[in-house]
Structure formats: C-alpha cells, structure tokens
Image (spheres, rainbow, N blue to C red):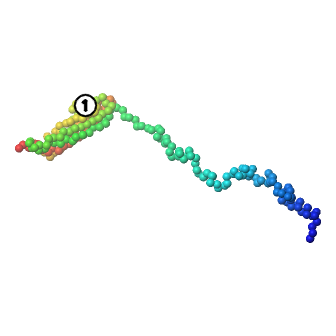
Amino acid sequence: MKLHPTALVVAATVMAGLTGCGAIDGPAAPSASSVPAGMGSPEKVADATPVGSSKKAPKHQGSPEHKSNPKHESTPTHESTPTHAPKPHGPRIVSFKVVQKPKCAEGTAVFRAEAVPLIIKWKITGADSAALSVDDPTGTPGTYGPVDLQGTQEFTFSCAGAVGTTETHTYAIYTVGGGTQKHKTLKVSAKVLDQGKQL
C-alpha cells in the first residue's frame, strides 16, 4: 500500500506530541516539571546519602561526651554532704584494763618462782583529774589516791588465802571534775599456789 506524503507528515506530528519532544530530529532537554517532586537539582540528587548507607549513625549511638561521662559515674549526692557523729561532751573513761595479769609465788624458799605483779592502764578525757580506789566496798573515789588522766599503775598482788583458793581484788577508776562523774571497775583474780615451804 502506498502512503501519501501528507499522511506521513501528519503521523510524525502526532508521534512528536505523544512523546513530549519539541522536535522530531533530536531529544529535548527535560523541563523542570519533568523532574520528580522532592529530588531537587541534579547536584543535590548526586550528593544525597543513599538510604541504608554505612554513613548513617546507629539509632542508639550516643555522642562522645556521653561515652566519657556515663550516668553511673556521676558523684553521689551523699558523698558531697558527709555527716559526722557529734563528739561526746564531759568526762569520759576511754579505757581501763589489765596489761599484766598477776601470779602468786610458788616453790620453796630456795627454789621459788616469784610473784608476778598486776599492772593496770587507763585513759580519761574531759575531766580535771582522776582517782583510783582498791578493794573499797563503799565505792568512795580515790581511796588509793589521785592519779593522772592517763597512766599505768603496778600492784603487788596479795596471795594470803589458803593454798588452792582464788584471790580476787577490785580496782576502780573515777573521773574528777569536768561534768558528771564516771567510773569503771576491774575485778582481777589469781590462784594461791602455796605459802612458801621451808627446807
């Protein structure tokens, strides 16, 4: 079938209108309306980071500052405001104890183990002075005599009881002045071994 030249021109014109080309003999540059919405200029499209790229920061990755200063390393409030127990006022007997236990003498007059004396030690604060009592059933301060606030005292331990019995003596320390009087008592015992045998 032979087509007329006029029909060929009309067909070419219709095809050009359908493809959006401005000319038949070459492709036309895309217009602004032909660029998809949201893509912007070609330069911006090229620089955009693809979805799923390795440059994307993890969802829970914190900043360097958060890594170097985690919450659990912050200074607790109670450490910045320490509390101290109030110091006691007035006289106080810090210590009153035996530092050497006594022992009664043992053996004959020639081969004899000598008695070991008793030694006590004390420390008092907040008082003007101290007083020591020995074997005083009335609880009177200072029947032995006044003593320093801190010191030691040696006693010859009496072992006058019957052989095999236990000898016990009582020692008491008292505060003097500075407030309400305080006192402590020690009971010290030693076994009577013998009365000393003659050859």
Give the farthest residue toward the left: 199
Which secondary structure, mark 1?
strand
Give the farthest residue toward the bottom: 1
Residue drawn at 8 percent across, 42 percent down: 110
Q: Which residue is mark 1?
A: 147
Residue drawn at 92 percent across, 71 percent down: 1
- The one of 136 and 112 positioned closer to us in this rendering: 112
Q: Please state the horizontal and vertical placement of residue 37, each as a whole percent of the image.
A: 76, 53
As drawn, 159 above or below 28: above
Among the 4 quarters of the image, the one containing residue 135: top left
Residue drawn at 13 percent across, 43 percent down: 113
- The one of 65 and 182 positioned closer to us in this rendering: 65
Q: Please state the horizontal and vertical placement of residue 55, each as a whole percent of the image.
A: 63, 52
Q: Amino acid at mark 1?
A: Val
As drawn, 47 above or below 87: below
Residue drawn at 82 percent across, 55 percent down: 28
Q: Please state the horizontal and vertical placement of residue 23, each as a whole percent of the image.
A: 86, 56
Do we see residue 44 in this rendering?
yes
Q: Please state the horizontal and vertical placement of residue 191, each as a whole percent of the image.
A: 17, 44
